[in-house]
Image (spheres, rainbow, N blue to C red):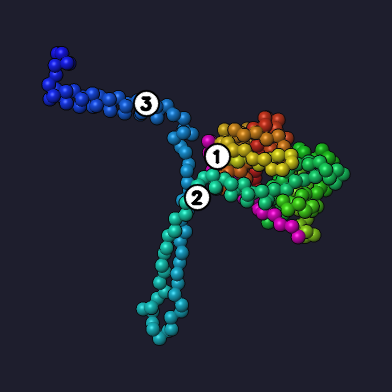
Amino acid sequence: MDIEHLTKHQIVLLAFLVGFVTSIATGIVTVSLMDQAPPSVTRTINQIVERTVEKVVPAAVPASQGAAAAAATVTKETTVVVKNDDLVAQSIATVQKGIVRIISLNDRTVLVARGVVVDANGIVLSDRGALEPLGTINFEAILPGGEHVPAVMRIPIGTSTIAVLDLQMASSSGKVAVVPIAQAGKLQLGGSIIRIGGSGSDTVGTGVIAKLPDSHSGLVQATVVSTTPGSIIINSFGELIGITTSDSLAWGADFYTLATSP
């Protein structure tokens, strides 16, 4: 068949055929590329939706009107869209209010370790390996607002590499926030984490959980590193996951000791 001598009817049919074959080929290539894409590309989290419920209860009804005028409840649902970037920034800002810097009474110019407040009574978790070699239990903690308060380390129990300190907040007007501890059973491989560390001002980094704690060690491996004692990793909701300790650093700068309640 000579293509130069096709009738108009044959040209239209040929155009339909070419378009049909092209669309099928495009679909096959697209599906193939999506199957080969890494999970981080296809699992992008763009927003989190929160739902709040508002209850409206009318004023008390006189007894003379009987039970027919029972209190009514009106439910109103409000959807709030929070971008993931905004959530991360808010979590960092909140957790920073619960981070203290621990210094020695002999040299107040050198940071010994960082600490994170996990209880309203001023209980702080830090790195035992950085504090214990100094041979004392008395330290000083610099609050987020810059105020100095005494911090007393509890006598370590067992082999835990996490130190527990008590801030003497009674003699201070400073305030600190409490950072909640994440539930270890809910941690997932690939879960987003934020590292807050630095020997001076706070530095942050983001990554994911690369390895979960197992029966051999209570260490969490992440894709973001930190060498400052007492640096922490949190999840996107501002919950404490792990702390940099001497034990975790022995495994590598990307390992963190799993945080547990004191």
Q: Quadrant of residue 186?
A: top right
The percent position of residue 107, horizontal first and vertical second, equals 85, 43
Dot label at residue 32: 3
Assess whether residue 186 is covered by the magenta stretch.
Answer: yes
Depth order, front residue of 108/89: 89
Between label 1 and label 3, give the one nearer the viewer.
Answer: 3
The percent position of residue 96, horizontal first and vertical second, equals 66, 48
Q: Amino acid at mark 2?
A: Val
Q: Secondary structure at mark 2?
A: strand
Find disc 2 in the rendering and name its residue. 82
Marked residue nearer the N-terminal end (1 or 3): 3
Q: Which residues are magenta?
A: 173-191
Between label 3 and label 2, give the one nearer the viewer.
Answer: 2
Considering only vertical position in the picture, is 129 above or below 153? above
Find disc 1 in the rendering and name its residue. 192
Asked if residue 161 can be seen in this view, the reply is no
